[in-house]
Image: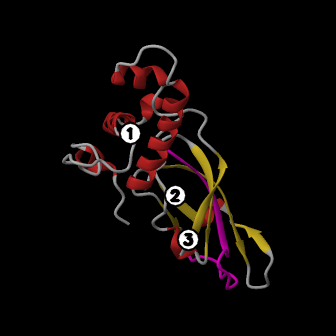
Amino acid sequence: MFIAPTIVTGPTIEPLTLDEVKAFRRIDGAWSDLELTGMIRAAREHVELMIGRALITRTVRLRASCFADLAPLPLSPLQAVTAIRYLATDGAEQLLDPAAYRAIDGLDAAIVATGAWPTTAIAADAVRAEVRVGFGDTAKEVPEPIRIAMLLIIGDWDRNREDTNVGNIVSSMPNGLARLLENYRRFA
């Protein structure tokens, strides 16, 4: 079982620019720039949680109780495995030789053994993998349906600034959002 991933190096950009959001929302001027910038980040984080994927490249540290937990990984798409460390049965931290494992990249990311995994100490964080995940380093590498879903979320948040909408028929998310994200959602 995984302990929540720790971000080592976060994304340096967002999948949408402020100008893209303002054009989509037909907003002129800078009066809402600060709010919209916050909404862009919040929408990215919301979509990442919804689909279980990192949109923009980042490095994360994954901690698990055993090597078997590395398949599947809790985040994808996997770009690279930086290092895997583990606690040996004597409690000493060891660096796993990269020849001992193979990374399966893409949307269904995993790290699998090329032979037998070493025996680890019994600990909630006996295995520590540092991986680079995300669709890419630029916004244009994020699939367009995901970017459009983010625009819909931001538009909904911008239009509906209150949690309660009395006297109107409301839905929890914009129409089409689930359809835009369904091909990218993790089911593991």
| Image coords of residue 58 (percent x, y) | 59, 45
Q: Is residue 93 left or right of residue 84?
A: right
Q: Which residues are magenta?
A: 116-134
Question: Closest to the observer: 148 or 160?
Answer: 160
- Comes first in the chain, label 2 or label 1: 2
The amino acid on which the numbered mark 2 sits, given as a three-letter code, is Ala
Secondary structure of residue under mark 1: helix
Specify few, some or many for label 2: CA neighbours under 10 Å numbering under 14, 14-19, or 20 or more: some
Which image quadrant for residue 12?
top right
The amino acid on which the numbered mark 3 sits, given as a three-letter code, is Phe
The residue singled out by tag 1 in the image is: 157
The residue singled out by tag 3 in the image is: 2
Secondary structure of residue under mark 3: strand
Secondary structure of residue under mark 2: strand
Query: Is residue 107 on the magenta stretch?
Result: no
In the rendered image, the quadrant that contains the C terminus is: bottom left
Residue situated furthest left in the rendering:
169
Specify few, some or many for label 3: CA neighbours under 10 Å numbering under 14, 14-19, or 20 or more: some
| Image coords of residue 36 (percent x, y) | 48, 30
Residue 103: numbered disc: 2
Query: Which residue appears at 70% of the width and 72% of the height?
Result: 86
User: Given contact means CB atoms under 8 Å apart, are the residues at marks 3 and 1 in contact?
Assistant: no
| Image coords of residue 111 (percent x, y) | 52, 63
Q: Nearer the viewer, mark 2 or mark 3?
A: 3
Which image quadrant for residue 3?
bottom right
The amino acid on which the numbered mark 1 sits, given as a three-letter code, is Trp
Query: Is residue 128 on the magenta stretch?
Result: yes
Query: Which residue appears at 52% of the width and 73% of the height?
Result: 69
- Comes first in the chain, label 2 or label 3: 3
Question: Closest to the observer: 170 or 100?
Answer: 170
Examine the rendered structure and indicate whether residue 84 appears above or below residue 143.
below
Residue 77 visible (yes or no): no
